[in-house]
């Protein structure tokens, strides 16, 4: 196998050396053989050799890499004005109006930040101010961001930092793996852990401020959630005085096809929703959407300002993204293309027992690779090999889940059935290869 | 007086109503009569009536509002590619090299974030990992950002959030006001407070992780720092095992004229420097610069990724900013123009006793307004009135300091002597007016 051949005459080595020297060792790269991407267009990325890659997992370029409408919006506004929210400006209001219009009544206030981390930070501060409590309940393999407080509720990474006793985890509601897989009472049983969490917080001297979940449980591996789980869980938290924060950074903006927001797919309305990555198609912008009631306590004692947040340029980019989603019916398209992918994967699965489970919605799909369909032993090494082989074959995909054995399909929303067919074709050959040589994995 | 007349036929009222309804009440606006800015160019801002304002305090548009070089860099790169740091890309390395080249030897690693808050978050996490300690020492009227942990070390705002007992304040080293004003031993006396802070932390069960200061003490009112203070203070902190974090968000990038970074002006080399606002001339980018030694402990247990940070577009913007600073000699220009402003202010002060003190360096100048030169009673209301009158006369300026009695001059770095003369002229007439009618204040 020649899985690690150099892409470009020494250039990669030079970049790797500079990178380690200039950025230090806390940064990571994707793939055994890192990719040197120099250009992007729609669902395509191009490396410095001109090699073309189908982008199957980047969700930041939501309406496609370098979408001309978004680029145009950024360029035009950048030439005119880019200040802050301490002056009046129309863009932040137009965008706030359009964004809150996508939410159920009551969730009608938008506050802006620059990153998903900052949006979750603000949500946490709002929840603490509103409830007067400090307890946080999170799932056990969640990603919510990188700041000190948010790294504390990011449970998917080990870090040297001790977690506060105000943070308690509950198991992710996974119907395929985990504590209550294949259990008809799974919704109730998983939800009961919220009671346990609240009891643990109480023993530690805390009341719950918030229960925060990524509403598609991306980092937990996109589990099929037992129907009714989230509504039950949220009810328990609310009875104990806590808020429900829906982290929509990954599921939001129509990706799931069936709904514009992940919480909608669970039939639950959050107290606070946070969003980020896809909002500006790469221009840094994030937001919290909530109610006047929730911010009341916070604004009494604190004010809020974030220099780069909600600027005329950021809001121009975000407005363009929402317009493209609507005008090109990208939510419906995600649903259609997603069904096409799911159907194709079912066909693949009939002939390849590596595929243990297929799940997801719209353009957010997980393929759970297993060593054995009965034991469901996660095929972690095989998944890694598949990811690297696909990269060689011009398909950029990632993996997720507690065991890193779930191929994650989360492409730009302009991903079409033709792109899906190419993905399925490459997947078929790579999974066949991986399955035929499990020893290589 | 007609200081609050409406600028634009009802439009302002409509924007204000929409703003309160859509963004909620935690947001604040500048000025009694908010400004509706629609265009910016160089040092000029224009409102929706076409009225022109001289921008005397916005530091984010470092090389001028909508600088064509930076706009061009953002537009060009946005059309080509905007991904993240998990692929190889030249821009982040070229910028890291150029940026770290501006620092003393040893500070040769750059890590990227999106906002000053995020840069300070990362600095705090690095310092905690490096020292194994959690104590933070900050000055008593400092601004460092908006996240949970950084709001805790932001001491200039009251908030409903209780400060942890791992955070201890020391008085800002002010030669004009404060504990040791006009005291020849001020440097030693202020520095001794670091001993007291370390003792307080010890009583609370903490060792110091870091002493963090904005190296021009912007929010403290740009005090004239007793010579030698910072070196003494840092030495005490280091002896107790803590690091020194220089928050260069405001003083950095040549603004002080004499030095490229604020720490340089104190003759102290930090363990970690953080920077933000002016870096990308408005495009969201921030950074931490430090040594391999400092990040060693952090990278052993944690990795670092920030979706929108260090992207090809962000680094293109930041590279353009550094190039413009160099090619147009903006640091030297800041020094010259700053001297011209300081001279002009001295002349004004001869005829206007509202001016109690003039201080600062390069294009970062404070005018301390007093009710009485002997008592130095802060002329807080008068300062507010001057700010609002200047806004009416087409000059946008702000105030700072514990008593909000210091006019803050911190314009884009392309501010020229001609702009300075216009500022001085308007200042003279407004301060005369305010002094003549103190009762109105």
Image: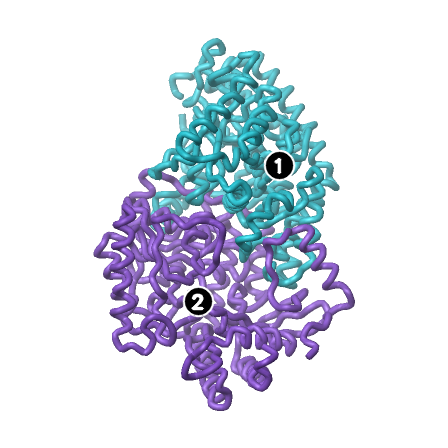
Chain colours: A cyan, B purple
Whether residue A418 can be seen here = no
In the image, residue B274 above or below residue A192? below
Near-viewer residue (A179 or A83):
A179
Residue lying at the far left of the rendered structure: B239
With A262 as the anchor, is A3 left or right in this view? Answer: left
Q: Chain of mark 2?
A: B
With B301 as the anchor, is A384 left or right in this view? Answer: right
Whether residue B277 can be seen here = yes
Local SS, label 2: loop
Q: Quadrant of the N terminus of chain B?
A: bottom right
Local SS, label 1: loop
Near-viewer residue (B153 or A41):
B153
Residue A106 screen position, x and y as percent:
69, 41
Q: CA distance from mark 1 to mark 2?
A: 39 Å
**Which mark is on residue B218?**
2
**Which mark is on residue A252?**
1
Residue B29 screen position, x and y as percent:
61, 62
In the image, residue B343 above or below residue A258? below
Residue B304 screen position, x and y as percent:
41, 42
Residue at the spot 73% in from the left edge and 62% down from the top edge: B13
Q: Residues within 10 Å of mark 1 (few under 14, many from 20)?
A: many
Near-viewer residue (B3 or A388):
B3
With A166 as the anchor, is A69 left or right in this view? Answer: right
Please identify the quarter of the rendering in which residue A365 is found: top right
Q: Are marks 1 and 2 on the same chain?
A: no
Residue A131 screen position, x and y as percent:
53, 40
């Amino acid at each position: 196998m020649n899985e690690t051949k150099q892409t470009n005459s020494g250039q990669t080595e030079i970049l790797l050396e500079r990178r380690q020297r200039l950025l230090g060792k806390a940064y990571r790269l994707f793939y055994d053989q890192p990719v040197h991407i120099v250009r992007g267009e729609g669902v395509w990325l191009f490396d410095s050799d001109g090699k073309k890659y189908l982008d199957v997992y980047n969700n930041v370029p939501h309406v496609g890499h370098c979408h001309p409408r978004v680029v145009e919006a950024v360029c035009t506004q950048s030439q005119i004005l880019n200040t802050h929210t301490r002056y009046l400006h129309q863009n932040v209001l137009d965008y706030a109006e359009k964004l809150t219009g996508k939410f159920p009544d009551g969730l009608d206030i938008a506050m802006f930040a620059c990153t998903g981390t900052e949006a979750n930070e603000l949500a946490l501060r709002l929840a603490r101010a509103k409830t007067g409590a400090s307890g946080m309940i999170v799932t056990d393999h969640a990603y919510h961001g990188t700041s000190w407080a948010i790294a504390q509720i990011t449970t998917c990474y080990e870090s040297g930092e001790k977690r506060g006793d105000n943070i308690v985890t509950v198991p992710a509601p996974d119907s395929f793996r985990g504590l209550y897989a294949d259990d008809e009472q799974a919704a109730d049983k998983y939800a009961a852990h919220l009671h346990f969490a609240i009891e643990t917080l109480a023993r530690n001297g805390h009341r719950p401020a918030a229960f925060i979940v990524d509403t598609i449980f991306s980092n937990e591996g996109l589990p099929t959630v037992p129907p009714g789980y989230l509504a039950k869980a949220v009810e328990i938290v609310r009875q104990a005085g806590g808020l429900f924060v829906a982290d929509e950074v990954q599921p939001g903006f129509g990706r799931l096809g069936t709904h514009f927001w992940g919480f909608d797919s669970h039939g639950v309305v959050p107290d606070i929703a946070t969003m980020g990555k896809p909002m500006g198609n790469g221009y840094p912008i994030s937001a919290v959407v909530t109610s006047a009631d929730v911010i009341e306590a916070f604004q009494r004692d604190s004010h809020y300002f974030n220099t780069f947040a909600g600027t005329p340029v950021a809001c121009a980019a975000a407005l363009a993204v929402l317009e493209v989603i609507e005008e090109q019916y990208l939510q419906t398209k995600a649903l259609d293309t997603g069904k096409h992918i799911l159907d194709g994967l079912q066909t693949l699965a009939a002939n390849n027992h590596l595929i243990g489970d297929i799940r997801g919605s719209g353009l957010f799909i997980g393929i759970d690779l297993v060593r054995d369909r009965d034991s469901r032993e996660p095929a972690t090494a095989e998944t890694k090999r598949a990811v690297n082989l696909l990269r060689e074959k011009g398909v950029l995909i990632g993996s997720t889940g507690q065991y890193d054995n779930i191929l994650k399909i989360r492409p730009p929303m302009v991903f079409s059935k033709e792109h899906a067919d190419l993905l399925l074709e490459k997947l078929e050959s790579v999974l066949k290869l991986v399955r035929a040589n499990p020893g290589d994995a």
